[in-house]
Each structure stands twice: as structure tokens, then as C-alpha cells.
Amino acid sequence: MLTPEQIVAAQKANMETLYGLTAKAFEGVEKLIDLNVNATKAAMAESAGHTQAMLSAKDAQELLALQASMFQPLAEKAAAYSRHLYDIASATGAEFGKAFESKMAESQAQMAALVDNAAKNAPAGSETAVAVMKSAVAAANNAFESVQKAVKQASDVAEANFNAVTTTATNAAKSASAAAKKR
């Protein structure tokens, strides 16, 4: 049986975890806001500069060259923005994952202690029921670990795919920009 002190301690620990996760979520939002503000400022400054350059163009060929020169940096900046966005999301998600794993490990330890305590206090002849309970707890723990591994593998594959797509898009923009400059 849980004592009132244990219940209060568990509630306190849960609240501390909740506040910690809330702080991490706000930290992620702050980083996202900073990223968007900086990206918007940079885009506005570049837009003003490109507009001035285009208005100063002496002929159509210079105007086309200016337009062509905009595409490669634009694609690279979009890729960098996406990378920063992904990094913020994955770092925040990793913090939540760590907290979840910690709580799950704690719960698993409590369940194992509960089963052990029940086994010690079980009446004679209930060894089979205790063994079944221990087996069920072990199976649940193994299933959870398998899910964790699968999620980690899926996350690694998604990151690799994201990196490949970003690289391909940037290279395609460079090729298009180079081809446009040759015209």
C-alpha cells in the first residue's frame, strides 16, 4: 500500500516533470519565433536589395541575370530554414522522449517492486499466478523496449530522408541557377 507521503512525493515529481516539459515546450516555441523573425527580416532586406537592383538594371539581359542569381541563394536559404526548423522540432521532441522514457523506467521499476512485494506476501500455492504476473510484466517491458527501438529507427530513417531531400533540392536549385546564368 502507498503511504500518504509516497503519494505526495509522486505527485510532486509528476508536477516537476510537467513544469519541466512545459518550459522545454516554451523554449522550443521561442526558438521557432526567433527563427521566423530572423528569416523574415533577412527576406525583407534581401527583397528590398533585389528590388533596387532590378530597378537599376540597364537592359533586359541584366534583369534576367539578376533574376537568375536570386534562385540559388533562395533555395539554399529555404533548405537552411528547413534544417533549423527540423533541428528545433527534433531537439524539443528528444526532451519529451527523455522525460517519457524516464517516467516509463520509473513505472516499470515500481511495477516490478509491486510484483515482488505481492510474491513475498502471496499465500502458499500461488506460485503459478505470481510467475504468470512476472511473465506478463516482463513481456510488457520487452514490448515497450521494442517499440522504443522501432521509433528510434524510424526517426533515424526520417532524418536521413530529410537530409537527402534537402541536399537534392539545393543541388537542383544550383543547377537551375547555373543553367539560367548561361543563357
Image (spheres, rainbow, N blue to C red):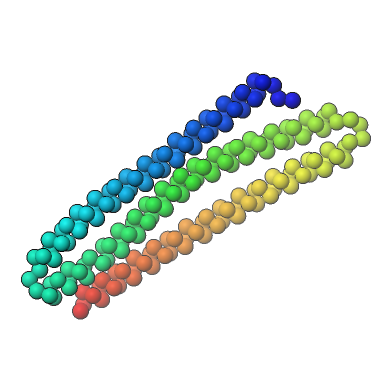
94 displayed left or right of 45: right
Query: What x and y, as percent, mark residue 109?
Result: 68, 35
> Residue sitting at 12 percent across and 61 percent down?
52
Query: Nearest the camera: 116 or 85?
Result: 85
Query: What x and y, as percent, mark residue 167?
Result: 38, 64
> Residue sitting at 37 percent across and 46 percent down?
32
Give the residue furthest to the bottom: 183
Instruction: Look at the picture and state if 164 lies above or below 175.
Output: above
Query: What x and y, as percent, mark residue 42?
Result: 24, 53
The image shows a total of numbered marks equal to: 0
In the picture, residue 51 is in which quadrant?
bottom left
Query: Nearest the camera: 74 or 153?
Result: 74
Query: What x and y, as percent, mark residue 72?
Result: 27, 66
Q: Quadrant of the N terminus?
A: top right
Q: Quadrant of the C terminus?
A: bottom left
In the picture, residue 130 is in which quadrant?
top right
134 displayed left or right of 126: left
Instruction: Look at the picture and state if 1 lies above or below 153.
Output: above
Instruction: Look at the picture and state if 24 lies above or below 153.
Output: above
